[in-house]
Amino acid sequence: MVSVKVEHVTKYFGKTKILDDISFEVKSGELFFLVGPSGCGKTTLLRTIAGFYFQNKGSIYFDSKKIDNLKPNKRNTAMVFQNYALWPHMNIEKNVQYGLDIKKLKNDEKRKKVNEVLETVKMLDLKNRRPQELSGGQQQRVALARALVVDPDVLLLDEPLSNLDAKLRLEMRQEIKRIHLETGITSIYVTHDQKEALSLASRIAIMNCGKIEQIGTPREIYENPVNKFVAGFIGETNFIEGIICETNESIVIIETSVGKIISKCKTQKKTGEKIICSLRFEAIEICNKKNVNTENQFEAKIEHISYLGESEQYDLKLSGQVFVKATAYTVKEKINMQGSMIVIKFNPENVILLGE
Amino acid sequence: MLFSWENNCVFGNFMKMRLVLYAILGFFAIFLFYPIIFIFLKAFFYNGRISFSFFQYMFTNSVLRECITNSFFLAVVVTFFTAFLSLPLAFITTKFDFKAKAFFSGLLLLPMIMPPFVGAIGMRQMLARFGSINLLLMKIGLINQPLDFLAGGGFWAVVFMEVLHLYPLMFLNLSASMANIDPSLEEQAQNLGANGWKMLKTITFPLLMPGLFAGASIVFIWSFTDLGTPLIFEYTRLVPVQIFNMVTDIGENPMGYALVVVVVLLTLIFFLFSKFLVGSKNYEMLSKGQVAASSAKKLKGINGFLCYVFLVSMIFISLLPHLSVFLTSISDNWFMSILPKTLTAKYYGMVFSHPLTVLSIKNSIFLSTVATILDVILGLLIAYILARSTLKEKSILDVVTMLPLAIPGLILAFGYVACFSSGPLDVRNNPFPLLVIAYTIRRVPYVVRSVYAGFQQTSVAFEEASLNLGASVSYTFLKITSPLIAANIIAGAILSFSFAMLEVSDSLILAMKEQFYPITKAIYVLVGRISDGSYMASALGVLGMLLLAFSLFFANKILGKKMGQIFRI
């Protein structure tokens, strides 16, 4: 297995800067995710690693080997394209075998490998079909097989599940997880779907406007986002602005238009400075009346309730024209009504403090 | 070693590609621009000084002035009539559904299978003072005296032939535009309360404008510069005929240059005009709808009947020239009777035994084959560069390769005679090299378009997937790209070959000696022979017609709806 190192890669399209001094390292055997909104440069980065684009500055290494000057056909990566790019004039077997033809393997060896990989993706029965005769999920499996069969150094996946329906996507997610565990190939996976990333990734890089905002494990990214963008992009969160009025070793007290909020989060900022509190929807608890001697409790008016099946989402109005959203598991008896007053409370540990 | 980002591109080496691009541009510079520039210089410089005397002379000389007016008037009338006929045809065939629609739509394209000057040979028989039509009309008692259809030197006969030959081009352009209109745009108009006419006027027609202009400019330029038809009808007061006659004393009489300059300028104006109009109004449909079966209305009752009457009579009239050529070719001395009295196949036999025709067939096949091979090579290279490279210069290449669509064969041939007349390419010695080049240049846009369409339909990801798996650029081209666009290459080659076989004006001008005559020149020369020339010419014409018919049929089968786009400017 190889590791991938990207160093200070910058890429322009015309005069527009698409990738801005990107650096990161993918360890061997990792399933590394590039996540970001559309237009953030994640696909460009993936295609640069594949060699379809050439960076204007910076270098890319596979292990310690610099691959900047290698054409895409010399990099030994295998890409799964968003639209699968299965060749319509060849059947499934031929499609999968293509990479082996180029490597000039012996015929029986080719056949063995093709059968093995088709078995892995559970497509052996359909190997004589043409791509047009397969469903989206099946095409996806074939595309994966075609990439895997050549034993690539790096597997590159470009939004591989985005053309599938919701149910199939869940199923294929598990498949990819399983295949990655079985093969252990270093993989870089591009998606804008945060759930895909959180559930599959060894590590995630969050990208925005051509830059990497944060790299970390799914848990690190979700629980300790480094800035407002990451917090807002991964998971759903409320932002409440305020000014630090007191800090000591264990707690930070923030003055906001709702009132004083207490956080157990660490911050570099000092008393008197502006700060943003990030509060996940699910971190907010909805109660009927205030408890005595508990911090972070506020009265709120229910503006709207959206029923989501397993949960309900509350749009709440707090004092000082602050609006927040909260999710709570649906309970059988419907107690809270639109327009009624309730109390919200949240744990100081769940108040994440962010700079701009 | 310093690595240059600029020089790298996924689909091949940047420098190599740039070299190919400049080589192609060089080819066009020598064989497309140089002749035209040469003509301009000759027309404006006389004895080393700038002079407009030829132009002055052109507009003071009554004959030349008349020729220019006639040609212009002819082109306007022909364009008007083709549009007038094609609009309802395109409308009926795209908006309505009726039995045997595909069959009728196919028949509408049939006039294209014959150069109009071949049809003219047959029609001359039919329209003559004692030709079939006059005799028929007299027999059923409509007239007592034969009418003189060819009065005024045959102006209207030329119009008739050209309209019949050119309306399919207009029809293809219009129906391509019409099929491209997203039906929901019209449905929205109806939904907002617009009735049929209102919708037609405010939505459908404006969206059709690009197609109409594209078609109109081709038809205009075509009819303005058509040489064969007026030659057969002996209608000499037209610019192309004058230019043709001036080729023989090209050295002494500079008037030819001035006339060509007029044609080039006019063509250029039309080309830019239509580019501008089409370009600025090229509405990208947000969602391409299927107009075909789903939304097309069934035609029933009296409307359906009227539609059939219109289609059938249109097809009948447009096939009249073909019919007449065919009848002429199998008749034994057809004179003073509605239909030929005795039939014979001997002229077909003569076509394959007479040295002039046999040689011309051989010549044409040889010339067209070479030109087609060159076209396919050039077309593939150009289309590849246009579709897959990121070279900045490719926009120049795009414009340059499409120019031959606008530059008439007449002009090109005249330019070749003028500027290569003393040198190794002199057409008086051996016209083959220049004939091949003329054929190649004139038809290369069709191949480029056809292949380019293939590249566009084929997702780049197919090629990337192959490169990604370790295949080289050339292996990818061989194994992935070529099979995927094979149909388009074949269609382009078929079109290029068959049009080269029946190329008229450059063949008439460039082939000066009998041993070098291609088919079309042989037909023209045969018509001039008194005894059985017309019959043999017709037989040869029928054979050419069959060839073109099969070619177009197969090209249409392969390209489907894309066919209309091939014939656009």
Image (spheres, coloured by chain):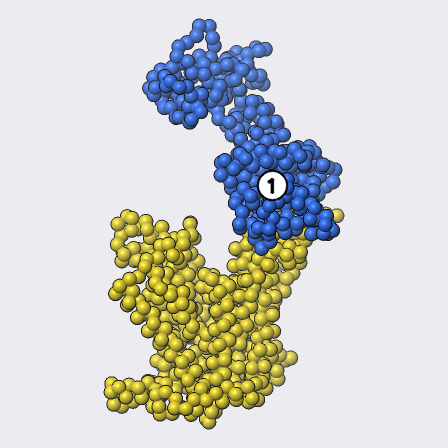
Q: Is residue A60 above or below residue B102?
A: above
Residue closer to the observer: A140 or B59? A140
Circle 1 residue: A122
Picture quadrant of residue B235: bottom left
Q: Mark 1 lies on which chain?
A: A
Q: Which residue is drawn at 64% across and 40% down?
A: A120
Percent coordinates x, y for residue B292 in the rendering: 39, 57
For numbered disc 1, what is the local secondary structure?
A: loop
Q: Is residue B269 above or below residue A334?
A: below
Q: Amino acid type of disc 1?
A: Lys
Q: Residue at x 50, y 67 (%)?
A: B555
Residue B132 seen: yes
Percent coordinates x, y for residue B310 in the rendering: 31, 70
Picture quadrant of residue A331: top left
Percent coordinates x, y for residue B476 in the rendering: 64, 55
The chain letter of the blue chain reads: A
**How many labels sit on residues?**
1
Disc 1 residue crowd, few under 14, some 14–19, many 20+, Cα 10 Å: some
Residue closer to the observer: B303 or B453? B303
Q: Residue at x 61, y 82 (%)?
A: B430
Residue B249 seen: no
Q: Residue at x 44, y 58 (%)?
A: B279
The colour with which the image depicts chain B is yellow
Q: In this view, does B81 lie above or below A292?
A: below
Judged from this view, the residue extending furthest toward the top is A292
Residue closer to the observer: B24 or A171? A171
Picture quadrant of residue B431: bottom right
